[in-house]
Image: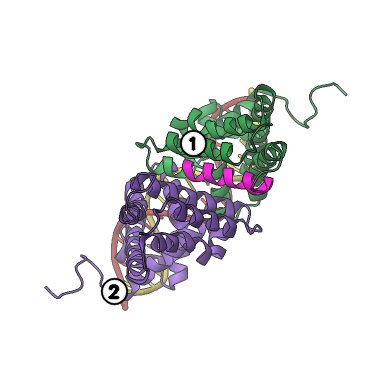
Chain colours: A green, B purple, C yellow, D red
DNA sequence: GTCTATATAGAGATAGAC
DNA sequence: GTCTATCTCTATATAGAC
């Protein structure tokens, strides 16, 4: 109809500000321990105003997940556009651990920690949050497929890289003082090179 | 003085029952979202009685962590006693993922999820909880040392195995339907064999 | 040691004025 | 669209009887 904007609701600066603030706070403090007061305080609006934009806390959560999906999707597209081959693209993924090192040390992985928290809360948005993993899984699988025949199935390789990234993030959070994050990412990159078939 | 019991307070069946119930609930629901009502309900006592045993919620948390430490320590000692060489012992560690598969799928790793939650809550018991990781890290390091000269430093190898276990647990929680847990643990065992020096 | 109140604070959520 | 005021529920924690 009016071009670019295909998503249902995107109106309002305040709404976007709420989502942005909630995104940060959910990451830093966790979903459950972040209150409306925290978010509205961060945005600089009253608690009452809140409910004009979101009827429930779960609605904000959904919006935050959507925001994260859009953000990561854009990131993946950038890598796909910028990098030479599939191996190099996969290494881009691995290196976000280094790029976001300080945040990961403080708060862990934004996707993994949210997934675990919602799982424990037995929250209905658990599946929605898993879509974030799906995004990376599918993208990684695609890259491994593009590599040609590898020793491991493309999806298994994708899950392997995902799992190792998650583990590194969790331990980097528990042991923030280590240089272990860099060491592990290098090992992971070496692993990618090892399973990649030699170029003709 | 009276032999075995060297820890300060161990009196009381009710106290132990509270710790046990809290341990389970903290694992299943998370620390923050577990209320006194939940725990006292599970034990079958009144909320008021609670405060005769624990003055604050943080005190229960400390007791739960202590309980987990003791439990894991006993487990490690069993493996050290039962298994032939260091490589076999390390594989015992790796295989707890399989042994506890159904719980891990539902709730993740009890150590990793607690560590991440307390980290996000910026909770003072965060360091205490890291002691659980330390336990495994030190034990694993010891096993790698006992292997003789390996391609990786013993502590780096220990952290590597810890990280991969954490990652597998997180993804197994997000994707409970996969047989990916088994595949990954086999890969990890193969990795251990690969870095182990050949027996003379 | 266990119970029944109760105090207090904070959460999510609503109503209605501007 | 934003505000203040308020409702309701639940959480941790306390007091005091048995």
Check residue A91 in the rendering and tell me which mark sits there, or answer none: none
**The N terminus of chain A lies in which quarter of the figure?**
top right
**Label 1 belongs to which residue?**
A185
**Label 2 belongs to which residue?**
B12
Over which residues does the magenta segment extend?
A151-169
Q: Image quarter for residue A58?
A: top right
Structural crowding at the residue carrying mark 1, measured as other residues with C-alpha within 10 Å and reported as few (<14), some (14–19) or many (≥20)? many
The answer to whether residue B150 is left or right of residue A65 is: left
Please, which chain is the residue tagged with disc 1 on?
Answer: A
Tell me if I can see residue B31 in this picture: no
Magenta-drawn stretch contains A49: no
Please, which chain is the residue tagged with disc 2 on?
Answer: B
Q: Main secondary structure of the magenta part?
A: helix
Residue A127 position within the rendered picture, expressed as x and y whole percent measured from the top left: 67, 49
Residue B118 position within the rendered picture, expressed as x and y whole percent measured from the top left: 41, 47
Q: Is residue B168 above or below residue B101?
A: above
In-front residue for pair A116/B141: B141
Magenta-drawn stretch contains A165: yes
The answer to whether residue B66 is left or right of residue A9 is: left
Q: Secondary structure at mark 2?
A: loop
Q: Is residue A108 above or below residue C6?
A: above
């Amino acid at each position: 109809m009016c071009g670019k904007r295909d998503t249902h609701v995107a109106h309002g600066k305040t709404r976007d500000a709420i989502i942005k603030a909630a995104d940060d706070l959910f990451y830093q403090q966790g979903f459950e321990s972040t209150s409306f007061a925290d978010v509205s305080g961060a945005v600089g609006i009253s608690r009452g105003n809140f409910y004009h934009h979101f009827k429930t806390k779960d609605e904000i959560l959904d919006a935050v997940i959507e925001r994260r999906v859009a953000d990561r999707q854009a990131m993946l597209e950038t890598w796909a556009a910028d990098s030479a081959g599939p191996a190099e693209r996969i290494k881009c993924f691995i290196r976000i651990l280094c790029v976001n090192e300080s945040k990961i040390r403080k708060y862990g992985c934004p996707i993994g920690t949210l997934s675990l928290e919602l799982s424990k809360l037995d929250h209905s948005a658990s599946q929605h949050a898993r879509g974030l993993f799906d995004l990376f899984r599918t993208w990684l699988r695609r890259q491994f497929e593009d590599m040609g025949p590898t020793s491991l199935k493309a999806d298994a390789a994708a899950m392997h890289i995902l799992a190792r990234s998650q583990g590194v993030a969790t331990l980097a959070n528990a042991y923030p003082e280590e240089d272990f994050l860099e060491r592990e990412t290098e090992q992971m990159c070496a692993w990618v090179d090892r399973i990649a078939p030699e170029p003709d």
